[in-house]
Amino acid sequence: MESEFPDELEQKFDREETLRYGENPHQRAALYLDPASTRPGAARARKVQGKELSYNNLLDADAAFECVAEFSEPAVVIVKHMNPCGVAVAASSREAYAKALACDPISAFGGIVALNRALDADTAHELVKIFLEVVIAPDAEEEALKILSEKPNVRVLLTSSMPDAKETTRTMRSIAGGLLVQTRDEKVLEGEPKTVTKRSPSESEMKDLLFAFTVSKHVKSNAIVYVKDGATLGIGAGQMSRIYSAKIAAIKAADVKLSLKGAVLASDAFMPFPDVVEEAARVGATAIIQPGGSLKDKDSIDAADAAGIAMVFTGIRHFRH
């Protein structure tokens, strides 16, 4: 701990470029690079086309790329305002993109798309059908770049490789008069999830549960994520009450005509009340994954048993502020 967080913290950053503005036009901003870091991502990516990157573009592209790096299968993440609005894995990037887009095509407008495979022409043909701000991938086929050039304002970033989702690094965030430093949230689980209900999840449910919990790690707290067949169906993010995140996720799914019957639900932190379980039962979800650890865990377990829902505890939470 002493060596990890020394009494005096000195770190050198080199200014890479001055940005057009910060989060808003009246704010000034610049991008600085850590010369000691080799982590692939938006900050060091090669821009092969598109307008100048903005402060918000860089934040969103970084969030999308870090999320998509969690998956070994071909995956696509669509981010809007630092939150995933669609995530999917599939046999191909094109299929993953179609599944991710179906989750929230409204929010995807003007969004950021991240891939964990080289961008191919088939996927590029789909990307140019809507307005996007940034596409970030480890590489791209020449034909794919030619197709994207039809939309010259779209920033296309190539990183050459994927970041290691399990790499232990430090993250820093400034507050008034100081700096908060922590180790990066480099894990999804600690050991095997524990079934706490009478019914255990099926093999397919467990696969979706693990996928959903991984996505929830990258959604602002309070986070609720509905998933079926390796694709998000509804995401509720950043609400002050977990039940409202659950309700928003269900509303979003209903708005795009996606049924939640047979879906699974992931929560980034424990459920202190049975209300989220009851909401999941109302929309037809069949399994839930959550950290557990509330003094009232039994209330949620009892509600799951009453609804025939399988529930597993992970023992690890993923608050994201």
Image: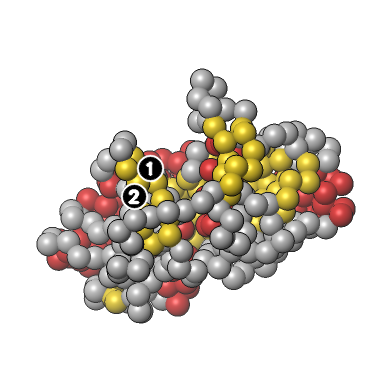
- Position of residue 253 in the picture relative to residue 149 (left or right): left
Q: Give the Cα distance between marks 1 and 2.
A: 6 Å
Q: Where is residue 31 in the image (x, y as percent from the top left)?
A: 58, 41
Q: Is mark 1 on a helix, strand or loop?
A: strand
Residue drawn 18% across the image and 55% down it: 272
Mark number, residue 180: 2
- Position of residue 39 in the picture relative to residue 49 (left or right): left
Q: Position of residue 239 (x, y in %)?
A: 32, 41
Q: Going from the N terminus, do you reach mark 1 or mark 2 first?
A: 1
Mark number, residue 257: none
Q: Is mark 2 on a helix, strand or loop?
A: strand
On the rendered image, what quadrant is the N terminus found in? bottom left
- Position of residue 183 in the picture relative to residue 306 (left or right): right
Residue tagged by mark 1? 174
Residue drawn 77% across the image and 49% down it: 124
Quadrant of residue 18 in the image? top right
Quadrant of residue 181 in the image? bottom left
